DNA sequence: ATGCAAATGATAATCGTTCTTATTTGCATT
DNA sequence: AATGCAAATAAGAACGATTATCATTTGCAT
């Protein structure tokens, strides 16, 4: 799906670290990863990259539209592959698991409220913090 | 409105730094202030407080329910007097001005969506980032 | 093969925030 | 009003996430 050409298309040279990071997001079962996550996973996988490079590459991918950045309340950013859609997030306070959702009604009301207050909406972040109840917590902090 | 007794009621000794911070939030025209903001304003006003104390006091006030903390995407927290109501925020990307709003429909949908996914909602943060259009930007970054 | 701009990696620096510890303060008790 | 002591403070060190610096290496067009 995303391949070296995607880097070229985005105006980015196809370098080893970039391919490694992109590949990780495409193959990992974990959709949401922080810079530190990516760094550690690559190291543990025997891939040799610098932490600074990971940060740089993630930011470039975000600007290129390959990844989307989420700022969570603990002060860390997590990244996810850009599926092209927009969605918001529910974060389990117990296990940190992230669930995505999209609600047309919420999106519509946001537009309306913002316009009424005389703003032109650019972006928004809606993060719901909750406890899993029905589901088993899939991963501990 | 909020006075020394409020500190006592919250189980907090009525100390000078605490009174200064509380008083600032009650009298300032700026409703949303970061720890750094509070620190600088007090210093400029000739009040001698430590930055660490400001952080501690803000956190205590948050726990006591006197203030509410907001995490914005730049990684800074801002605090505001707890009016008792809940509301979300629109932040102007140009001037940083913060506007508050409340939308019953959005709140209701959040509850619904979260419940449907098997979570018990604890809290949420909805931040809309936008540009002022009708209004003059009241303050530059 | 060569050259050079662009990218990398190691490390230092920065920023907001929290921790540590010696000193000071609020306040209940004499 | 003086005393005692736990609680609170101030200064600075420490911290975690992120960004900047800069010498070295790489991708890739020639």
Image: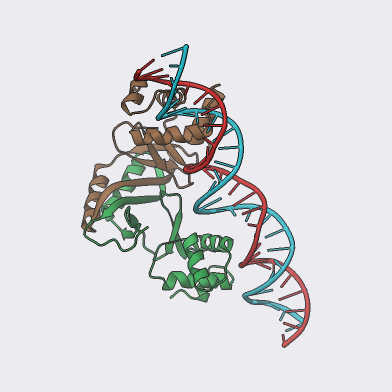
Chain colours: A brown, B green, C cyan, D red
Residue A136, position in %: x, y? 47, 34
Whether residue A34 is visible: no
Residue B82, position in %: x, y? 42, 64
Q: In this view, does A138 lie above or below A26?
A: below
Q: Using the image as rendered, state which of residue B48 and residue B9 is in the foreground.
A: B48
Quadrant of the image containing the C terminus of chain B? bottom left
Residue drawn at point x = 43 percent, y = 76 percent: B1
Residue A85, position in %: x, y? 28, 34
Residue D29, position in %: x, y? 34, 20
Q: Quadrant of residue B33?
A: bottom left
Q: Using the image as rendered, state which of residue A60 and residue A124 is in the foreground.
A: A60
Residue drawn at point x = 36 percent, y = 25 percent: A7
Q: How many labels does the image show?
A: 0
Whether residue B140 is visible: yes
Q: Using the image as rendered, state which of residue B78 and residue A92 is in the foreground.
A: B78
Q: In this view, does C24 lie above or below B97?
A: below
Q: In this view, does A115 lie above or below A71?
A: below
């Amino acid at each position: 799906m995303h391949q070296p050409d995607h880097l070229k298309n985005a105006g980015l040279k196809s370098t080893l670290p970039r391919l490694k990071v992109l590949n990780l997001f495409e193959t990992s079962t974990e959709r949401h990863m922080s810079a530190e996550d990516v760094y550690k996973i690559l190291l543990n996988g025997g891939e040799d990259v610098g932490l600074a490079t990971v940060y740089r590459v993630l930011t470039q991918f975000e600007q290129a539209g390959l990844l989307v950045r989420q700022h969570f309340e603990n002060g860390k950013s997590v990244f996810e592959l850009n599926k092209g859609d927009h969605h918001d997030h529910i974060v389990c306070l117990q296990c940190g698991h992230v669930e995505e959702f999209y609600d047309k009604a919420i999106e519509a009301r946001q537009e309306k409220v913002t316009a009424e207050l005389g703003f032109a909406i650019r972006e928004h972040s809606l993060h719901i913090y909750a406890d899993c109840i029905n589901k088993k917590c899939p991963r501990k902090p």
